[in-house]
Amino acid sequence: MSATATTTDIFPQGDKGPADYFTGTAWIKILVPKDETGSYSVGNVVFEPKTRNNWHTHPAGQILLITEGKGYYQERGQSARLLSKGDVVVIPSNVEHWHGAAKDSRFVHVVITNLKDGSAATWLEPVTDQDYDALPTR
Ligand code: MN
């Protein structure tokens, strides 16, 4: 258990998320690899404060189950949704969005990602500091 883990963590922290599509420090633990049908995978993602993933889409959607902390989910052209423990987000196929931590809190969610032709996501550009810093904190 690392220095940043807390006693409330449910799943192991996992490996550091790729800098290619995270701004800041994230940790990814695959809980269920692509299943035998090739249709979904399940993982746990920990975002340190201010960390978020790039804008991206999922070819067959994704579900987020928030288990710890405070964070955001935002679809392109929409206001960001502030999230906390117990929130559930259903992300439709091919909708541009990002998710990540609030400025002052870690954020942990389980992701159930539906796959299409083996693909889980298409990664786009980072969320800029300017856009992130302008988000409401409540
Ligand atoms: Mn996503």
Image (spheres, rainbow, N blue to C red):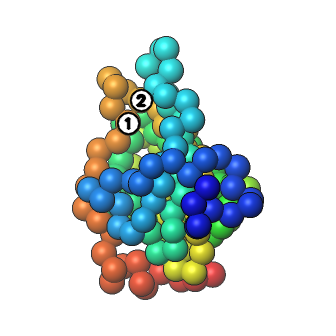
Identify the residue shown where x is 74% and y is 59%.
8
Tag of residue 131 = none
Identified by mark 2, the residue type is: Leu
Identified by mark 1, the residue type is: Ala
Q: Which residue is mark 2?
A: 115
85 and 49: which is toward the camera: 49
Residue 120, position as x, y percentages in the image: 38, 36
Residue 91, position as x, y percentages in the image: 50, 47
Identify the residue shown where x is 52% and y is 80%.
103
The quadrant of the image that shows the N terminus is bottom right
Identify the residue shown where x is 51% and y is 68%.
48
134 and 79: which is toward the camera: 134
Above or below residue 40? Residue 92 is below
Q: Is residue 128 left or right of residue 138?
A: left
Q: Which residue is mark 1?
A: 120
Whether residue 115 appears in this view of the structure is: yes
